[in-house]
Amino acid sequence: MSSAAPPAWHAAIVADVDAHLARAVSEMDLPANLAQAVNYALLQGGKRLRPTLVVLSTEAVGARREQALPAAAAIEMIHAFSLVHDDLPAMDDDDLRRGQPTCHVRFGEAMAILAGDALATLPYLHLARCVEDAARRSRLIEELAAATLAMIAGQTLDTLGGFAESLSARQRLELTHRSKTGALIRSACRLGAISGGATESQLAALTAYGESIGLLFQVVDDILDVTQSAEHLGKRSNKDDAAGKLTYPSILGLDESRQLAERLCSQAIEAIEPFGHAADGLIALCRYMAVRTK
């Protein structure tokens, strides 16, 4: 495994994505106070994992980064919407996100709800305006909408339940995370493939990679929640255990959870071997995600 530092090229992708995000919001006709809350939720840093996966997947199929940016911005808006609503008092009731007060703490609950609503809507308008090819635009919008709905379904399971009684605790946990967290990560890879004009075999390989890295992300997140401080993570730690939620460490223990993370990393890398060196960025990102500390 590699060190816990992001790959050196990651900062350049983040800079391109952030510039695109800021421009996209500035071009929308929003009241000043809503625009302020949207920008606060969207541009306060973060790993930018999902837009980075869009960019790297587009580049892996031989297309230019510029082709990826509309979809990269769109999926980050959806991710920001999910965090704003996830942090609300009726949901996880968090007061810290990325080392800063959460949106509802900073702007009030009503504005946070409205900012989340805007961030759930803006991506589709952005794609409609930015992607010229009609067939590709339709595929991107359908892909993002399906992933967003799956994420909401996963959040429902995580917060309110609704599982089939026949499912074991581990099956419930995996179903939740493949939806709540994994759906957007898998979709990021697919959005990048579609943006770059991938073949069906390339799309299938990147989908398999996204499936593995999506679950990997959540397994590592669960590990960090019980091994790192809130100060280090920039968000409240030990919150899942305190809420009685299922996590990988609570079911498997820390050692087996770490072993699972290593297996998922290997599976992800194996899925994109046919791309050769074009997938070097995706491989490096996967290895970083397996050993990250925040």
Image (cartoon, helix red, strand yellow):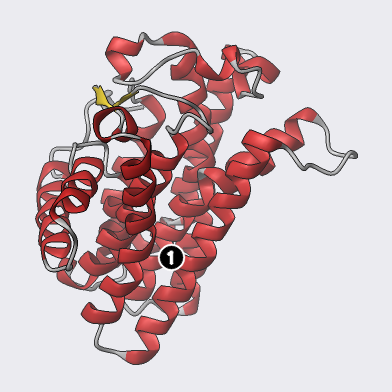
Against 74, is 40 above or below? above
Q: Residue at x 31, y 59 (%)?
A: 54
Q: Looking at the rendering, in which quadrant would you find the C terminus?
A: top left
Q: Position of residue 151 (x, y in %)?
A: 54, 51
Dot 1: element: helix
Q: Residue at x 20, y 37 (%)?
A: 7
Q: Position of residue 128 (x, y in %)?
A: 30, 80
Image-based side of 108 in relation to 266, left or right:
left
Image-based side of 66 in relation to 120, left or right:
left
Image-based side of 20 in relation to 275, left or right:
left
Q: Pointer 1: what residue? A: 190
Image-based side of 61 in relation to 241, left or right:
left
Q: Nearer the viewer, residue 36 or 31?
A: 31
Q: Position of residue 147 (x, y in %)?
A: 51, 60
Q: Position of residue 159 (x, y in %)?
A: 63, 34
Against 168, is 116 above or below? below
Q: Residue furthest right?
A: 166
Q: Dot 1: within a 10 Å radius of its alpha carbon, few (fewer than 14), some, or many (20 or more) residues?
A: many
Kind of residue indicated by mark 1: Arg
Q: Looking at the rendering, in which quadrant would you find the N terminus?
A: top left
Q: Residue at x 62, y 23 (%)?
A: 247
Against 287, is 79 above or below? below
Question: Would residue 236 be visible to someone looking at this image?
Answer: yes
Report the number of numbered marks. 1
Against 199, is 282 above or below? above
Question: Would residue 267 be visible to someone looking at this image?
Answer: no
Q: Residue at x 42, y 32 (%)?
A: 87
Q: Residue furthest bottom?
A: 134
Q: Nearer the viewer, residue 245 or 31?
A: 31
